[in-house]
Structure formats: structure tokens, C-alpha cells
Amino acid sequence: MTIAIVTLAVGMWAGVPMIVVTASALAVALPNVLWPFLAGAAIVSVVHRRREEVMPDIPSFLVAMAGELRAGRSLRAALASTVTGHPELEIEPAGRLAAAGRPMDEVAAALANASPELAPAAAALEVSARTGGKVAEAFESLALDAVDEVELRRQLRADSAPARLSALVVAGFPLVVLAIQIGAGGLGRIGSLGAVGLLMLVVGLGLLALGVVLTVGLLTRSGRRNRAEVADEQMILFTRVLVVALTGGVPLHSALGVAVEHSHGPLRHEVGMVLRMAGRLGLAGALMADRGGMAGALMSRLAASQLSGAPAVASATGFLADVRSRIRSDRLRRARRLPVQLMFPLGLLILPGFILVFAGPLVVGSLTELFGSLP
């Protein structure tokens, strides 16, 4: 038990993810059962840590690409030159394809496959090659967004660290002690207490299990994108492609047709309906008709620009800034709400369950010695 507690404490101090710390302590108690689980958890942790380490290198790659393009180099030459300076991103296949003169859609696919965070840059490359859009501006904007994303993730980790540490201690320690007790046969004394001991064991284990499941679910959900954020990110990619096409001098109707090729699901269907209605209602009328859909806010801004004669690029870039700001606010709000949400499983399920399983037998045993056998 001492070794398991030391393992738990060292893992917490080192900032190791909760699943790895808990699995390590349990593996000390039950090595024959939980070592495979520990190996799987370690692999998951390494993959997650690898992605977190790569993320800060993306802004420098995007800035370098923008610099090469502003210096007058072609898309292919700029990509082939920039890739060699960023081996940590593992995007060499995209650079080789660009240098070999392969179609830009193949180059973009190789770039997007290297990291999900590079998908917008890959789409900008492909669309710029087709339309002649000013991709350097797109890369500069993407670099600013990537820097903001890195800072936001650091802030989210800092804001949620106290809550995650509390959850680790309160939820992980009972599991370690329980595994040690099971391995040592220490729970057998509960059965000697008769019906009372059995009831305490069942209720206590039930509360512990439910509390741990709810705690893990809350922690997992807090770091996962919700449905609204996924929809917003689809809109961001769609709008970025639209801006690149517009900066190449492509008319708004054709730019929407180019952007819809980089969308999917309801968004693709919605924009396709707008383009089809444009032949009957005119583009401004079709944009105004799309009010309640996923792209309704963007279409309203584009319709206003069509009616007023203002540049559509300005409307699209303003929409991008608003969506990014909303995503940031929503993620910060979820992170700061996490401690309140964890109070229920930690305080009302795990702690009572721990008391029933481990402290209850001592109390019942003392009462039995004082007042005789219990039923």
C-alpha cells in the first residue's frame, strides 16, 4: 500500500494525466491484472502529449510560409522551403510532393494528414492555387489564430488544474486503496459483519463506481469540443476558404461554390440550397432567405454587403473574428464551471462510498463489541 500511495503522489506532483497516475498505482497493487491497462494508458498519454508539443510549432510554420509568399516565391517553392525548417511537424511528404510538381490537391491532402490543425492551411493552399487568392494573408491570419489557440489551451489547463487535481485525489485514492484491500483480502472482514456489512459493501461500492464514472465523464467532456464548437469550426474553415477565393478576384457566387467543396454535412447542403436559389431569387435574395440555418449569420452579412456594395471580404473577416471570440468565451466558461460540476460526484458519491467501504466496518465492529452481535 505504501508503494501505491507513493506512486500516486509522485504522479500528481509530476503532472502526469489522471488516467496514467491511477493506472500506475493500481498496477502496483494488482500487477498481474492491470499492467496491460497501464501500457494502453501510457500509449494514449504519449499520443496526446505529442499533439500538445507540436501545436506551438504550427504558428512559426505559418508565419514562415507567409513570409516566403510575400517575398514573391510561388506556392510550391514556399512550401518546399518552409517544410525543411520544421521537421517536428512531420510535413516533409507535402514538401516533397510540392517540389515534384504534383497536383496541389495532393499536396494539400498530405499537409492536412500531418496534423488536424493544419487542415485550414491545406485548404487555403488548394483554393489559392485554383483561384489566385492572396494566400499570404490567409497564412498570417491562421498564424494569429494558432497563437491564440496555444495561449487558450494553456489558460484552460491553468484554470482547470485545481479541479482536476481535486478529482484525482478524491477519485483516485479510494480506487487505489480498494484495489490494495481486494488484493490483500482485507474486505473479508466486512462479510463477517452479516447483513449490515454486506449492505454497506454493496452501497459503498455502488456509490464509488457511480462517482468515478461521473467524474471521468465530466473531466473528459470538459476537454472535448461540444456540438456547437464543432459547427463553429466548420464555419471557420468554410469562411477562410471563401476569403481566399474572394481575394483572388472570384465573384461571390463562384467563391461560395469553391468554399462549399470544403464543407460537409448540413453546412454543405445549406450552402448548396443557397446557390440553387440564387438562380431564381438572385444572390442577395438567396442569401437573405437563409436566416435560420447553420450559416445564417454569415449569409446575412454577405447579403448586406451585396445590397450596399461593400466588399464581401470585409464581411467574411468580421464574421471570422466574431466566431473565434465566441469559441474562446465558451471554452473558458466551461473550464471555470468544472469545479462546481465536480462537487456532486466527489462530495456526494465518492466520499460517502469511501466511508461506507473503509470506515464503516470499523464503526460497526466497535458497536458489535459493545452491544453484541448484529443481525
Image (tube, rainbow, N blue to C red):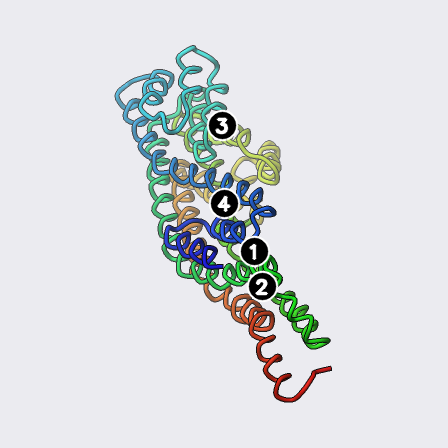
Return the disc, 4 or 2, that comes first in the chain's sequence. 2
Q: Seen from this angle, which residue lies furthest bottom?
A: 371
Q: Secondary structure at mark 2?
A: helix
Q: Is residue 251 above or below residue 48?
A: above
Q: Nearer the viewer, mark 1 or mark 3?
A: 1
Mark linked to residue 149 = none
Neighbour tally class for label 2: few under 14, some 14-19, many 20 plus, Cα within 10 Å: many
Q: Secondary structure at mark 3?
A: helix
Q: Quadrant of residue 321?
A: top left
Under mark 4, the amino acid is: Asp
Return the disc, 1 or 3, that comes first in the chain's sequence. 3
Q: According to the image, label 1 marks what residue?
A: 217
Q: Quadrant of residue 335?
A: bottom left
Give the residue displayed 47% in from the left and 66% down from the top: 340
Q: According to the image, label 3 marks what residue?
A: 113
Instruction: Find the distance from the CA under tag 4 to the CA under tag 2.
Output: 32 Å
In this view of the protein, which residue sits in the foreground, 173 or 304? 173
Instruction: Give the left or right position of residue 292, taking residue 239 as reference.
Output: right
